[in-house]
Amino acid sequence: MAKIHNLKIKNFRGIKTLDHTFGQVSFICLVGRGDSGKTTILEAIEYALHPSWNPSLSDNDFFNCNTTVPLEIEITLRDVDDKLLRDTKYGLHVRGLDGDGKTICDDIKDGQEKLLTILFKVEKDLEPRWFVTSHRPLQEDIGIDTGDRASFNVFLLSDYLERHFSWGKGTPLYSLLKQSGSTSDNSLLLNVARELKDSIDSAGFSHLDAVVDKVKKSSLRFGVKIDNTKTSIDIKDIAIKDGKIILHDDLIPFKLKGKGSKRLISIAIQTELAKDGILLVDEIEQGLEPHRVKHLIRTLSCNTNEQIFLTTHSEQVVEELEPENIFIVNNNSGHAAIARANNEEGEKYKKIFRTCPEALYADNVIICEGKTELGFCRAIDKNRVASGATSMVTQGVVYAWGNGDESFWRVPISFDTFSTLQLILPAV
């Protein structure tokens, strides 16, 4: 199934520009400070590749509400279904992947992997448009329909909602039902209503028979024969509303379970919809205890058929991941960048990530060699707030325990375009 190779964003919400190549990585965890654009990246992917034809858009979706500059999201995909690469589809717009595994070529050479680039564009009229595009001179973009976008199987996991455990229209369970080829539309509710009517009727209304007999005899006197009359319930009055048929654990509705369990069950249901596709999960740790978050990460990382993008602010998530799966988002006045740890020094970075994950969520980091120095920083921060000064958090500063590890003196916690400040406090 299709995987995202490169992502470009222009003028979308808090991101003015972003251009990043994910390459062959299939498990991507976006970390970074709040408002760096992590959620915006997930929603950009959903907008560009989701089959919905009428996303709700407004001037607020443009960077600084500037509608004079088009909103553009460009995604280049690899492992695209061969049906979409035929000349009768989008084959004339196919691009190639150079031997370095990163560079996208419009002059395709033999042996190159074929890529397809999808462009989602919105202008001042707020009308969304989807195209297959290339950067070849004079080649016009070609529109891509909802059915072909649906084949990319992109799914944004939403937070737990009670409706996720119901069989109403538009719910994940209902979508799984349709995927299985079972009946759709209103037939599910209608069948339940009919079965309920039969059950009520079979119980009988024998205590009403004496009155019914009197009505039969009286009606016959007036010239109306109603020998087959019986008491039953009108199926129109069986009020089984959409979404009222829900999952139960024995006799207990799922909606009464704990928040963490509901979150995990909801994820389990939704991931079934996204098999062999692109799965997007925002703030994966919501409502979960540390050990359940770690198990969730381990489980998702085993889904080798999907490409998974997730965001987090959780230290437990970072500790569970390998360095090559951690992508750090930075945003400088709308110019966003995504950085990774150098794979050649993966073991060194792994030690830092697992010892001091707080360092990934700040612009500036104070590494404390021991717990005494960490206590000094806490006291200084507390005194600043008490005296009316801004806190270290407000200044984008994190103080973290280096656990006495000498590697912090040698390995900078900065990647590519990042300029993270480290102040090493010597042991006392």
Image (cartoon, rainbow, N blue to C red):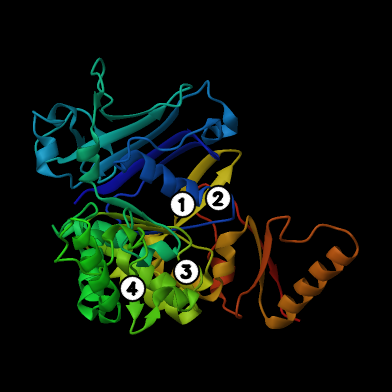
Which residue is disc 2 drawn over? 418
Whole-angstrom CA distance, mark 4 to mark 3, is 33 Å
Whole-angstrom CA distance, mark 3 to mark 2, is 19 Å
- What is the secondary structure assignment of the residue under circle 4? loop
- What is the secondary structure assignment of the residue under circle 3? helix
Which residue is disc 4 drawn over? 247
In-image side of 108 versus 25 (left or right) = left
- What is the secondary structure assignment of the residue under circle 1? strand
Q: Are marks 4 and 3 in contact (CB under 8 Å)?
A: no
Q: Earlier in the sequence, mark 4 or mark 3?
A: 4
Which residue is disc 3 drawn over? 318
Farthest residue in the bottom direction? 250
Q: Is residue 273 visible?
A: no
Q: Earlier in the sequence, mark 3 or mark 1?
A: 3
Label annotation for residue 339: 1
Question: Please, what is the three-letter code of the amino acid marked with disc 4?
Answer: Leu
Whole-angstrom CA distance, mark 3 to mark 1, is 15 Å
Question: Please, what is the three-letter code of the amino acid marked with disc 1?
Answer: Ala
In-image side of 259 versus 233 (left or right) = right
Question: Please, what is the three-letter code of the amino acid marked with disc 2?
Answer: Phe
Q: Earlier in the sequence, mark 4 or mark 2?
A: 4
**Residue 32 drawn at (x, y percent):** 54, 56
Q: Which of pointers 4 and 3 indicates the residue nearer the eye?
A: 4
